[in-house]
Image (cartoon, rainbow, N blue to C red):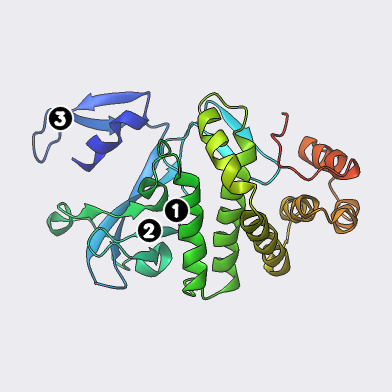
């Protein structure tokens, strides 16, 4: 039955009959997409629930942006590290809620699915970006991130959300939303949030690959700190890929806005 909920996300599916419950409209995901089901226990109320984790999938179309965000037609993003309890509605880190014994048996078939943060703020709501951002900033205020790694994850989410006002300004889907959010993001409060979040992120971020070093250079570029951005870009070993060239050129021209990378 749980797989039935996923049928709308996949283009290639095979109709099969569930051998256990004989439900005729049971859908089996094609071999192009694989996933596992995790059994979780809420750290707050001890409620048991489940979550899906996509392990591999086929992407037909994607767009990559200079701040590292990727928009794709993948069915379910695989980076949901924070989930919401289906009973007490409190957030928790997925890695801290995973049960050691992941065996799925009759006692787990009726579990509710853990909610994810984007589902709390549907994209059709005019203020979904604002609510989404406030949710993450509130998590930081309540010390939900007790390690720098967790804080880095949340601050990157905030960075991407604040950049969405620029990212989608020419999109036909988001054009109306942009006009509304432009009024919000032009305020000094939002600009300060963007700057302070990115300054803190640059301070705690620990690049250990050329890709992560390029992302850190992008942080400095968007902060307008072109000296540090250029230093990081010049010190990289890999300089012949398209993403590097485009971010290097934007930094050289003193551009600070996020942009879509051209493949």
Chain-order first, disc 3 or disc 2? 3
Q: Is residue 203 above or below residue 68?
A: below
Mark 2, Cα crowd under 10 Å, few <14 / some 14-19 / many 20+, is: many
Mark 3, Cα crowd under 10 Å, few <14 / some 14-19 / many 20+, is: some
Secondary structure of residue under mark 2: strand
In the picture of the structure, the residue carrying the numbered disc 2 is 83
Res. 241 image quadrant: top right
Q: Which mark is residue 17?
A: 3
Q: Quadrant of the N terminus?
A: top left
Front position in the image: 151 or 196: 196
Q: Which mark is residue 139?
A: none
How far apart are labels 2 and 1 at the CA level? 7 Å
Front position in the image: 67 or 129: 129
The answer to whether mark 2 and mark 1 are in CB contact below 8 A is: yes
Residue in the image at 68% along x and 69% along y: 204
Give how far across and how far down residue 177 sits, in percent: 51, 35
Q: Is residue 160 above or below residue 24?
A: below
The answer to whether mark 1 and mark 3 are in CB contact below 8 A is: no
In the image, 46: left or right of 94? left
Secondary structure of residue under mark 1: loop
Give how far across and how far down residue 172 sits, in percent: 54, 23
How far apart are labels 1 and 3 at the CA level? 30 Å
- Is residue 79 among the parts visible in the rendering? no
Residue in the image at 82% along x and 53% along y: 224
Secondary structure of residue under mark 3: loop
Q: Which mark is residue 80?
A: 1
Chain-order first, disc 1 or disc 3? 3
Q: Quadrant of the C terminus?
A: top right
């Amino acid at each position: 039955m749980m797989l039935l909920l996923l049928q709308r996300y996949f283009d290639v599916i095979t109709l099969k009959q569930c051998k256990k419950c004989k439900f005729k409209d049971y859908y089996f995901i094609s071999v192009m997409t694989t996933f596992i089901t995790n059994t979780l226990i809420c750290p707050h109320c001890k409620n048991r629930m489940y979550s899906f984790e996509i392990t591999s999938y086929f992407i037909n179309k994607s767009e990559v942006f200079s701040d590292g965000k990727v928009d794709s037609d993948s069915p379910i993003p695989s980076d949901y590290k924070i989930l919401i309890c289906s009973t007490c509605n409190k957030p928790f880190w997925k890695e801290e809620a995973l049960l050691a014994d992941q065996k799925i048996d009759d006692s787990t078939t009726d579990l509710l699915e853990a909610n994810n943060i984007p589902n709390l703020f549907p994209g059709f709501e005019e203020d979904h970006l604002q609510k989404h951002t406030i949710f993450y900033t509130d998590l930081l205020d309540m010390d939900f991130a007790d390690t720098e790694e967790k804080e880095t994850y949340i601050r990157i989410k905030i960075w991407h959300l604040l950049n969405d006002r620029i990212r989608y300004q020419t999109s036909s889907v988001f054009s109306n939303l942009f006009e509304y959010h432009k009024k919000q993001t032009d305020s000094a409060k939002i600009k300060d949030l963007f700057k302070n979040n990115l300054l803190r992120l640059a301070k705690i971020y620990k690049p250990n690959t050329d890709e992560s070093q390029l992302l850190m250079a992008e942080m400095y570029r968007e902060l307008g700190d072109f000296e540090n951005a250029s230093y990081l870009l010049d010190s990289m070993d890999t300089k012949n890929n398209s993403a590097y060239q485009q971010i290097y050129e934007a930094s050289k021209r003193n551009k600070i806005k996020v942009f879509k990378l051209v493949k």
